[in-house]
Image (spheres, rainbow, N blue to C red):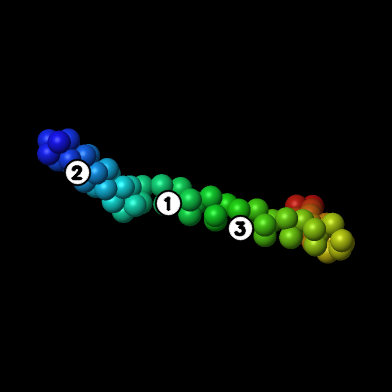
Amino acid sequence: MLRTLVSIQVLALAAADRVRQRLTDDRGQSTAEYALVLLGAAGVAMLFVAWATKTDKVTRLLNSVIDRVLDQVS
């Protein structure tokens, strides 16, 4: 009986040690931060595309840039 109790205690301590190691391990943290940055960038891009489709400013900007380049080339 005592031997079984000691075995259970050893297993419990080993399990607690593994849990503690998993909780203090931060190997996946940079991947999660990278994913959050990508989601943020995608959100900003979606807002920009929504704004650009409602206004004509982007089209006018690109046309003016192309016109200036063509004027300097010719």
Seen at 21% across and 39% down, the residue is 8
Q: Residue at x 26, y 48 (%)?
A: 16
Nearest to N terminus: mark 3 or mark 2: 2
Residue 4 lies, in percent from the top left, at 17, 35
The Cα–Cα distance between marks 3 and 1, rounded to whole angstroms, is 15 Å
Kindly tell me whether residue 72 is visible in this rendering: no
**What residue is shown at x 67% (from left), y 60% (from top)?**
44
Horizontal relation, residue 29 to residue 45: left or right: left
State the CA–CA distance, disc 3 to disc 2. Answer: 47 Å
Q: What secondary structure is marked by label 3?
A: helix
Percent position of residue 38, x then y: 57, 52
Give the labeled residue for mark 3: 40
Residue with the mark numbered 2: 9
User: SS of the residue at dot 2?
Assistant: helix
**Which residue is at the front of the view, 61 or 20?**
20
Q: Nearer the viewer, mark 1 or mark 2?
A: 2
Is 44 in front, or is 68? 44
Q: Is residue 5 visible?
A: yes
Label 1 to label 2, Cα distance in Å?
36 Å
At mark 1, the secondary structure is helix
Q: What label sits on residue 17 in the rendered view?
A: none
Q: Which residue is mark 1?
A: 30
Q: Which of 7 and 16 lies nearest the eye of the viewer?
A: 7
Q: Which badge, 3 or 1, comes first in the chain's sequence?
A: 1
Q: Residue drawn at (60%, 53%), measured in percent from left and top?
A: 39
Q: Nearer the viewer, mark 3 or mark 2?
A: 2
Q: Earlier in the sequence, mark 1 or mark 2?
A: 2
